[in-house]
Image (cartoon, rainbow, N blue to C red):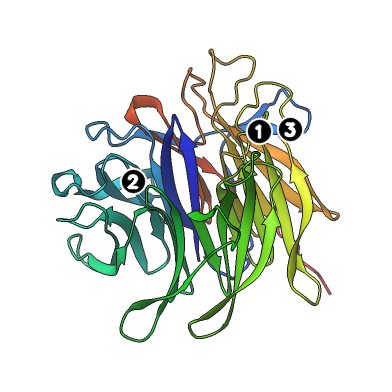
């Protein structure tokens, strides 16, 4: 299933899609070889990246979208899409090929929505020859680099989020200048068809920009602009059969937040713009299958948290939260950035490992965008016109029951 997140950074809306490794809950049998360092907080240890490399330095990327699955990743900059593969022999991500879209006006200077799963990768672009119609391009992994086809077309605005579920359902968020939009598409045997438009249903409200989907559930962000406080919402839709999606629930958010992640019955929304930032975790429960607030996560750091929740991803019983602006003692100046890992234990989410850059340079901004795959945590930063950071996941001992 794919995951999608939209962020606002330096006054520009940016989007990134990503996925998890599927519905099967996996045991973690990989030994993390990264060095554990003492952290400033007694609750966690710092793990430095095992691989760091600049991409898109000639393409004006600056801030990159990332989506990963297994040993494959798709990386998006301003004017190009990179397909990467992981080489375990030297613990590095290598460039397989690049798609340049600038000549076609494709990405119009903004990071597009990207996504990947076990069979294909996808990205959104402005349809060549048009001014405001967007389309989704996709490629199966076994195809040649130039074998991309149009999956969905006719989207009436700049695509800002992209999410797939079961390889047959797609949620798309878009910005049509004066309004937002969120659509659900389904595969009908010959192609993807628009089957629902997600709406909050309140006067002077906008639904869209970011949307995600998981199984029979889809969620989109909404903003009630008719109120002085600009109330933020989450709009939940449920599938009742082929092509039949219905409004299910509206969730009031305590503050603006656009980073979304879904996994099974869990839903997380990052809200980095209020104070130091926070993440609200909801769980679907009860006979009515309603999402209820389970816990609000805050930064475990005693210093420097500023954009906690700028990106967020649920992965089984773990939640990874990005704070690109976190600054802490022993590191240069500001905006070093960090990824925080929370685990679900004894009915609550507990902070643990913190992932940071070994360089610790000013303005690295680790955690602009985040993707979690089987054995790696990938994050992008702003150094060198865009840098990819790869962290090995902490080792978790498997439980073996003996007779």
Relative height, residue 252 to residue 311 (above, below) = below
**Residue 202, picture quadrant:** bottom right
Of circles 3 and 1, the one toward us is 1
At 31% from the left and 36% from the top, the residue drawn is 55
- Between residue 107 and residue 66, name the one nearer to us: 107
In the rendered image, residue 366, in percent from the top left (x then y), is placed at 50, 32
In the picture provided, is 328 more to the left or to the right than 195? right
For disc 3, the marked residue is: 300
Give the quarter of the figure containing the C terminus.
bottom right
Disc 3 or 2, which lies upstream in sequence? 2
Q: Nearer the viewer, residue 178 or 115?
A: 178
| Relative image position of residue 326 (x, y in whole percent) | 60, 26
Q: Quadrant of residue 234?
A: bottom right
Q: Contact, CB < 8 Å: mark 3 with mark 2?
A: no
Q: Nearer the viewer, mark 1 or mark 2?
A: 1
Q: Residue at x 18, y 46 (%)?
A: 105
Q: Residues within 10 Å of mark 3 (few under 14, many from 20)?
A: some
Q: Quadrant of residue 93?
A: top left
Residue lying at 73% horizontally and 49% vertically, measured from the top left:
343
Q: Mark 1 touching mark 2, by CB under 8 A?
A: no
Residue 274 badge: 1
188 relative position to 390: left or right? left
Asked whether residue 378 is in view, the answer is no
**What residue would you read off at disc 2?**
76
Estimate the x, y position of residue 265 in percent, counting from the top left: 69, 66
């Amino acid at each position: 299933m794919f995951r999608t997140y939209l962020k606002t950074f330096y006054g520009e809306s940016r989007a990134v899609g990503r996925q998890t490794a599927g519905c099967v809950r996996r045991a973690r049998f990989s030994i993390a070889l990264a060095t554990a360092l003492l952290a400033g907080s007694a609750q966690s240890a710092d793990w430095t990246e095992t691989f760091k490399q600049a991409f898109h330095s000639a393409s004006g990327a600056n801030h990159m979208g990332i989506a990963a699955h297994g040993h494959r990743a798709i990386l998006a900059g301003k004017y190009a899409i990179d397909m990467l593969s992981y080489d375990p022999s030297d613990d590095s991500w290598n460039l397989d090929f690049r798609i340049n879209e600038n000549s076609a006006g494709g990405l119009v200077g903004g990071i597009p929505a990207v996504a990947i799963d076990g069979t294909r990768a996808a990205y959104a672009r402005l349809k060549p020859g048009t001014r405001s119609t967007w389309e989704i391009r996709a490629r199966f992994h076994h195809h040649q680099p130039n074998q991309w086809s149009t999956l969905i077309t006719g989207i009436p605005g700049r695509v800002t989020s992209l999410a797939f579920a079961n390889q047959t359902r797609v949620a798309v968020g878009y910005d049509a200048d004066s309004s937002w939009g969120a659509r659900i598409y389904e595969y009908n045997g010959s192609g993807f068809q628009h089957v629902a438009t997600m709406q909050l249903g309140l006067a002077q409200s906008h639904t869209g920009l970011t949307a995600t989907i998981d199984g029979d559930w889809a969620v989109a962000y909404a903003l009630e602009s008719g109120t002085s406080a600009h109330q933020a919402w989450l709009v939940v839709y449920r599938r009742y059969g082929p092509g039949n999606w219905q409004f299910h629930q509206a969730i009031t958010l305590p503050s603006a937040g656009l980073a979304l992640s879904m996994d099974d019955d869990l839903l997380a929304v990052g809200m980095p713009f209020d104070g130091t930032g926070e993440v609200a975790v909801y769980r679907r429960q009860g006979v009515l299958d309603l999402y209820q607030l389970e816990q609000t996560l805050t930064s475990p750091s005693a210093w420097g948290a500023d954009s906690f929740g700028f990106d967020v991803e649920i992965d089984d019983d773990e939640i990874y939260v990005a704070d690109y602006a976190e600054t802490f003692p022993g590191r240069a100046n500001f905006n070093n950035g960090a990824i925080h890992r929370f685990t679900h234990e004894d009915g609550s989410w507990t902070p643990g490992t913190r992932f940071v850059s070994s360089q610790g340079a000013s303005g690295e901004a680790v955690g602009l965008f985040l993707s979690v795959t089987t054995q790696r945590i990938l994050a992008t930063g702003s150094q060198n016109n865009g840098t990819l950071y790869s962290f090995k996941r902490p080792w978790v001992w498997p439980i073996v029951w003996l007779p």
